[in-house]
Image (tube, rainbow, N blue to C red):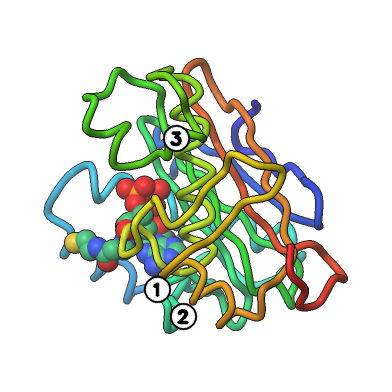
Amino acid sequence: MKTNTIITLENELRLTLIRADEVPEPGTFLSAGELAKLASLKIEKRRRDWLGGRYAAKTLLKESLALTTQLSAIEISYDSFGRPVWTDRLISITHSGPFCAAACGPARTKFLGIDIEKAEPRAAAWYKDYFHKSELPSHDMEAATRLWTQKEALLKALGLGLKADPLDIKLSGDKPEFSRTALSRYKELGSPAFTLNTLTPGPGYYLSAACENSGTGASEQ
Ligand SMILES: CC(C)(COP(=O)(O)OP(=O)(O)OC[C@H]1O[C@@H](n2cnc3c(N)ncnc32)[C@H](O)[C@@H]1OP(=O)(O)O)[C@@H](O)C(=O)NCCC(=O)NCCS
């Protein structure tokens, strides 16, 4: 997958992937408030990830929406569930290894989440904590990482992240099944129909996107 380019997926979902080493000087795209926030981030990885996420999101919004404002004037905030937003438009941000990605959908989208992860060997406990037996019968690292990104994309679309148990989502059948905290939040959001897509942005990396189906309104998936 090419970096620094916007791709369009189903449901008018726009997505951009960048590499941390493609991010320009912070002063060229951050506001004064964001520069202060950057200065408060002490851990180098967190600084790099946060910067990459801002740059990816700002360039995505500017180009997708043909904004004439400068990048520094596009400030990302968070909704009441902790999901990143710009004005009232839901966006999603993820980072892993050298990659940062951002996504946005059409103006009315209320269900959107992306997640990128690298396939790596994991302890048996990780498989047990994340997956139902019916989702992943064996400890297959590639299949598990793909599924993990799908679950995290959904947990972000629900505005829960890992505040919810990953086992609240089951991806073994035709359609994702929600239970407990995930189901309750899904209903709170109006049970929107949605689509899950998974891409491979680089060797060993998986990137999943969950996005409300355009033009469907609230209906059970
Ligand atoms: C959301 C979460 C699963 C992401 O974890 P991750 O896979 O390690 O990180 P990613 O790089 O893929 O995603 C990070 C991005 O998720 C987004 N995010 C954070 N909370 C979110 C939420 N509740 N809903 C949707 N997106 C969220 C943010 O945009 C964040 O990037 P930013 O901080 O640069 O803006 C994790 O941060 C989480 O569970 N947060 C909720 C629990 C919490 O608040 N924990 C406090 C930890 S100290």
Q: Which mark is residue 164?
A: none
Q: Is residue 134 left or right of residue 48?
A: right
| Residue 8 seen in the current view | yes
Of the numbered discs 3 and 1, the one sitting upstream in the chain is 1
Q: Are marks 1 and 2 in contact (CB under 8 Å)?
A: yes
Towards the viewer: 151 or 114: 151
Name the residue: 47% across, 18% down: 204
Residue at image mark 3 = 99
Ligand 1 near label 1 (Cβ, under 8 Å)? yes
| 6 relative position to 183: left or right | right
Of tags 3 and 1, the one toward the viewer is 1
Which quadrant is the C terminus positioned in? bottom right
> How packed is label 1: few (under 14 Cα within 10 Å), some, or many (20 or more)?
few
Q: Amino acid at mark 3?
A: Phe
Residue 67 appears left or right of 171: right
Residue 143 image offset from top left, x and y in percent? 50, 23
The three-letter amino acid code for the residue at tag 2 is: Asp
- Tell me the SS state at disc 2: loop
Counting from the top left corner in percent of width and height, residue 109 is at: 70, 72
Q: Which residue is painted at 87% across and 70% down in the image? A: 215
Q: SS of the residue at dot 3? A: strand
The residue lying at 54 percent from left, 21 percent from top is 202
Q: Quadrant of ligand 1?
A: bottom left
Pick out the residue farthest to the front: 134
Q: Which residue is mark 1?
A: 82
Please provide percent x and percent y for residue 27. 37, 58
Query: Quadrant of the rendered structure where residue 77 is?
Result: bottom left
Q: CA distance from mark 1 to mark 2?
A: 5 Å
Q: Nearer the viewer, mark 2 or mark 3?
A: 2
Judging by the rendered image, the residue that carries numbered circle 2 is 79
Q: Amino acid at mark 1?
A: Gly
Determine contact: label 2, label 3, CB under 8 Å: no
